[in-house]
Amino acid sequence: MASFYIPLHLSHTVTEIRGKERVTGVVISRVDADFRPVEGSEKLVKCDTLLLSVGLIPENELSKKAGVELSSDTKGPVTTETMESSVPGIFTCGNVSTVFDLVDYVAQTGGTAGACAARYAAGDLPGSRQSVDVVAGENVRLLFPQRYGFQDDLVLFIRAAEPVENPVTVEVTPPGSKLNRPYARPNEMLRVKVPKSKLAEVRQPVRVNIREK
Ligand SMILES: Cc1cc2nc3c(=O)[nH]c(=O)nc-3n(C[C@H](O)[C@H](O)[C@H](O)COP(=O)(O)OP(=O)(O)OC[C@H]3O[C@@H](n4cnc5c(N)ncnc54)[C@H](O)[C@@H]3O)c2cc1C
């Protein structure tokens, strides 16, 4: 199969890279239904460059060992706005929580996790807390954090499901907050903040929608 005269080797993976000073070729192998290379199907493709275009997911080795609940959407731990996981006293941040676009967001979650861990250690974060789920609504593919624990402002990181090139409103309901953004693109996380004061009376799941204005 070829597209724009470029051969496409579907259901294949690179199993060997050849070359000393630079790449001279790659060996590709067919994969089975479980994405395992099929022995004997190797083929050499001569080339001088190998470009890897891959997705990222959170590293969960430690999270799994700690027994924290994982989200099927973000593939990382389920956390509240304080970055606390489902296991009290275990806080997460950065790309362990969810894969962020920008290091600025990573640094922000690191600051929150550190400050809240210190509050927890000092006994300033209540032990047994109520929380409500934060759920993805219209045109939302990914949402972080997934729970609100009534401790701080809710800073949401949102990935749109479909691109909208016109102005959009990010609706957070309840409490019914509406925040405007010039567009929504799946590859650029939206960041919106809902103040703690607006969320105090919320008792049901908080739903987030992205609507074209
Ligand atoms: C190709 C690429 C380009 C990017 N470009 C930009 C950009 O231009 N601007 C921007 O703002 N952001 C960019 N980013 C995003 C940014 O790099 C990440 O969001 C940021 O580095 C994530 O920080 P982190 O500390 O959470 O994770 P990382 O930077 O991945 O750090 C995690 C560290 O933990 C270590 N580690 C893993 N497991 C263990 C373990 N079990 N024990 C001990 N240590 C462990 C790893 O070795 C690593 O050093 C880019 C990302 C990529 C992949």
Image (tube, rainbow, N blue to C red):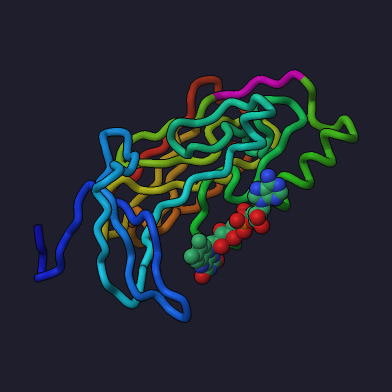
Q: Residue at x 58, y 46 (%)?
A: 155
The answer, for residue 213, to whether it is visible in the render is no
Most common SS among magenta residues: loop
Q: Residue at x 50, y 47 (%)?
A: 157
Please state which of residues 81 and 87 is positioned toward the viewer in this rendering: 87
Please state which of residues 44 and 166 is positioned toward the viewer in this rendering: 44
Q: Residue at x 33, y 65 (%)?
A: 26
Q: Would residue 118 be found to the left or right of residue 10 on screen? A: right
Q: Which residues are magenta?
A: 128-132
Q: Would residue 119 be found to the left or right of residue 76 on screen? A: right
Q: Residue furthest front?
A: 40
Confirm whether the magenta stretch covers residue 113. no
Q: Quadrant of ligand 1?
A: bottom right
Is residue 2 depicted above or below 42 in this figure?
A: below
- The percent coordinates of residue 102 (x first, y second) are 53, 61
- The percent coordinates of residue 71 (x first, y second) are 50, 31
Is residue 28 depicted above or below 127 in this figure?
A: below
The answer, for residue 54, to whether it is visible in the render is yes
